[in-house]
Amino acid sequence: MTLLTQILVSGIGFALPLLVAAVGELVSERAGALNLSLEGMMLSGAFTAVLGAVTTGSPWLGALAGILGGLLLGAAQAVLSVRALADQIVVGIAANALALAATTFGARLLLADRGQEVPAFDRIAIPVLHDIPVVGPALFGQTPLGWVCVLVVVVTAVLLGPRTGRGLRIDATGEDAVAADRTGLPVRRVRALCILLTSAMAGLAGAQLALSEVRAFSDNMTAGIGYLAVVAVIAGRWRATGTVLAAVLFGLAQALQYALPALGVAVPPAVLTMIPYVIAVVAVSGLAGSSRAPSCLTVPFARA
Amino acid sequence: MGALLELQGLGKRYGAVDALHDVTLSVSAGTVHCVLGENGAGKSTLCNLVNGGVRATTGSMAVREEAYTPGSPADALRRGVAMVHQHFSLIPTMTVQQNLQLVRRTGLRERLDRIADEFGLTVDTGRRVADLPVGARQKVEIVKALVPDPDLVLLDEPTGVLDVAEIDALIGTCQAIAGSGRAVVLVTHKLGEVSRVADAATVLRHGTVVGGGRLSEVPVPRLLSLMLGRDAAEIDADTAGAVGLTPAPRARFVPSASPSVPETTLTARNVPPASPSDPGTTPTARNVPSASPSDPATTLTARNVPSVPPADPATTLTARNVRSGASDASGPTTGPALSVRGLAVHHTDGTAALDAADLDLRAGEITGIAGVEGNGQSELVRVLSGALRPSAGSVRLGDADITSATPAVRTRLGLGVVPEDRHHEAMVGELSVAENLFLGDLARFRRRGLVQRAAMDAAATRVIEEYAIRAAGPRAEMRSLSGGNQQKVVLARELAIDGLSVLVAAQPTRGLDVGAVASVLARLREAADRGVAVLVVSSEVGELLTVCDRILVSYRGRLLGPVDAADPTAADRVGSLMTGTAA
Amino acid sequence: MSRLLHPAAVAALAVAAALIVGLLLAGLAGADPLTTVSALVEGMLGTPYAIGESLNGVAVLMLVAAGFVIAYRAGLVNVGGEGQLCAGGIAATAIGTGLPAGTPAFVALPAVLVAAAAAGFAWAAVPAALRAWRGTSEIITTLLLNFVGLALVTLMVHEEGLLRQPVTSSETLPQSAPLVEGAHLPELGLSRSPATVGIVVAVVALVAVGILLRHTGTGLRLTALGHAPEAAARLGVPVARTRFLALGGAGAFAGVAGGMLVATAPYVLAEGFTSGYGFSGLVVGLLARGSMTALAAVAVLLGFLVSGGINLQLVAGVPATTVSIVESLIILFIAGSAAWAARRRAALRAPAPRPAATQAETVGAER
């Protein structure tokens, strides 16, 4: 494989979990909920996926467990932010810390002596398409779970897009929760469901990372991908196409980071790390084009 | 046919306070039922209860004789109860179409066509709600309420933002809705509209029902006294304005003569005449609502009430008329206290909110600006207060150009403003009365860098006493005061400005109970008496006619007029200027 | 019943609940409750060394939280503590390693800390300006700059041309050279305790902030701005400038904290030196709900728990992560119950009349 192909393969490898989590987070943010706990959701998903796979011997059941792991954290975020009206940022940060600590604890307790043999997914090379030069292996060499991820992203974008009935309701909830409530929309239920969906997708993303890419669990293996997914939503200006583009871009940037030494380029990797965030700052500051976050983002809703 | 909506002993308690208690009323299908009450009587709480916004603490509700306990607006809609909100129910950044789609997606077009046929209501679905003028927005609200085919439509103070033509249209719509076999509940404090459209009315006062019934049995003057808790004979012009009754214009103060007999009679625009056996009250210093005794039982619409000269001239002594030369309203020695030239303000889409407005305010004179919301008067006030930058034009305060001055500078130069949106622009609810009074003037209480609270509290207590403000003390949180008392604090603060030369008051009596209204208007008059140029912006023409010397009308961003308030035809002239027909 | 709704009571209950969960987890790891508690307490308070370490951590938390509270009063949420800590640390290291070796403490220390404050202010200035004059959400911009700051530290300590100590062998750690001695935070001199004057600085800062917020015109104006920006503008508060200075000030506080971290043993800048203090400080600031005493209490609690955790692992064999779990749970429980209790208290009070505006007060909505 040429270096370029390698970069693309690992780039898409980073990008896919990022994409799943970001598209999920987009739904929540359109409804007005900011999930800083996305990182924790992904990490939980990764952990439970590995735990599930190792316990049952089946990677598919592991993936399912991963989704449930994400949902667990999502349920906490939903209850605390929507029902108890706790500050979304505090809950997000604390949930991340909790997930990090809990998965490290859990790994020590439950995964320590299982060895490194984790039932995982193998890549499938789609005939013909896989042989397309340069992009073939990257685009058409995914694992089955990877294809599931792509499917989930497409289905979510289609079913919940801003032009659909459900999408419209979600947008209304995030734009003006008071008006939405008076229109008869169940604001809290919409937000809670969106958070749960996000967490399920984040769990899936974690499972993809653990079972398709890394094929093991290690402490803090997500290392910031969750935050990056939130950033992708911002850089994508809260639109689906922008988010997808941003996620792919960020994934490639990550891959580039590790490939640079091989390319002989002297740019320090740390500089590359910064780029996604700088892009997002420019995007959100409106210095280049206009950007508008949902007006009710992070504002808890209560009918006074 | 049984009642469509029935309330029995309904009550809502917050902590130790009863916002509503013992409310019993019954609305029949096919009728328009008005719930009357002055501001503060409990009307909004009642709306919230019926609409599912809050839960009742006592009593019960029933729709079509089945128990009705909505826990959310969605529950209410499911039982066929729809509410037309004034501000909150449309998503501003979405289009009309999208907002309506939130209620119903399939068959929306057919529904809208049906509504257009049945009620004559059409809306432009492609436009963004934020770009619509207020009257159009309300139409969308009404259509939105009708889309799910409700049995009962509840309207909460709908006419405050409408001009005369739109009010007519709304009344027609209400009648059409009732005519189709549904019920309409119209909550309002405007007595004038009630007699035009209501089949039955219920009067709220101090949170409970004090009377009501079918309009054929309970005449409007009786409703008026029930609302205000006092005899019709004792109602003065200010109070009448507060309930949407227009006084006939009063004579202008004539400096040379002794207080001659400017005869001012309060005629309710829509008050059916008193029965002939009513001898008419003896002349008192207050205005007397009366109508020509030779005109019994004619149903009067808003237009055909003649301004009736009273049989005997009742002397009207208002504070303004009695001023003997306290201020020389005719020829000020210096230039105008405030002067606005060519002021223009544009919306984000390029249309003009204010269009080349010119205005001069003279010391000791009270100028009014009438007009329905959305014609530029809010923008004018915001430019004057410094909250909004004009796209063109200039504002001069005395000799100083304040067009781009900060609010702090304006205050220092003697400009006081009572903003329209009290809760957001005039006061900080979470701070105390003392802090609200002196936030702009803290240097006065500062020693060695720290604020001297004791001194501040003492000064605040003096203000509280002087203005008869009902508050637990200078440390009481501003938001714990009633609307009227909050407004008193705001006024006290503005009136205390050192070297006050101009006072701008935007909708100063909105949402206030009758007593507070009188107090506020009295303070404005007082200010004018001591030489301040006062500008009052109000959507209540009656109020302006009572208190102003001259009235301008804000229409589509231009200031039309002025109309001399003492002119007998002032009310009509103002009215026609408001609709855009030439004066 | 309403007695239980008092914020302190709610917080206490939350802490208790979290501790119980912690004990259960410790049990899973094979330690009985008694051993766990004694190891924890011993770790927190047992040795002067542990107490000293904790106090240093408490100082950092207090500073970050105090800055956070100032900005929060003005209605701004500073999520950028991590990045501002980084900026402060970088500036402190640059000055601290650049000064000549014999620089006396009364020159070096202030120089280092002032540089750190300035760097923190500058780091917050971009989000602050964007918010003050363009209405861009500071939650998002400060959050983003955290990662840039962390990456910047990595850059600094990996490049010899920047702050990396001279590379003598392949095992040279990627970290800065040590700060000159004059720039070391003096220790309090308590025997066998590494506690520095940092805690004194922090307490003084806390008191100053308390006085500022409650007893000065600036504090009143900040409060007014945070609650009702339009009314504040009307009453003469220069809104944009005040917002800028408030958020910048929060950055300065966090910057100083970063400088203090670097000026404490082992006196070098290394990756990860912020140890999440930026986020923890934010949590402390939010949970304190405006009260300086509450702030101090929460900072002490969180700061000491960390030491307790280390000992827990050493003595009882319970993973230190247990303590992190308990910490997170404490925060979650307090956050959840505090908001709930506040609403229950508010429900007992009659509602104020509804204003004519919607709830859209945050992201992107410039007034």
Image: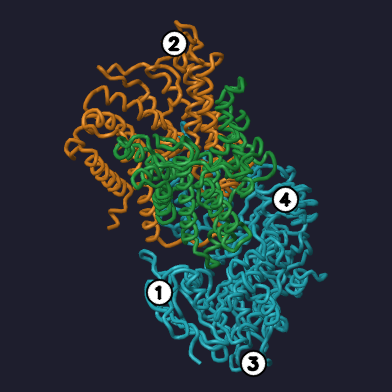
* Between marks 2 and 1 in the image, the one whose residue lies nearer the viewer: 2
Chain letter of the cyan region: B
Q: Quadrant of residue B223?
A: bottom right
Q: Name the residue under label 4.
A: B337
Chain ID, mark 3: B
Mark nearer the N terminus (3 vs 1): 1
A238 in relation to B517, above or below: above
Chain ID, mark 4: B
What hue does chain C carry in this figure? orange
Give whichever of A99, B181 is nearer the camera: A99
**Residue reaching furthest to the right:** B582
Are labels 3 and 1 on one chain? Answer: yes
Mark nearer the N terminus (4 vs 1): 1
Q: Name the residue under label 3.
A: B297
Q: Do the residues labelled 3 and 2 touch (CB within 8 Å)?
A: no
Dot 2 amino acid type? Val
Residue depicted at x 40% and y 15%: C184
Give whichever of B306, B568 is nearer the camera: B306
Residue depicted at x 29% and y 23%: C52
* Between marks 2 and 4 in the image, the one whose residue lies nearer the viewer: 2
Q: Name the residue under label 1.
A: B11
Q: Where is residue B540 in the image (x, y as percent from the top left)?
A: 65, 68
Chain ID, mark 1: B
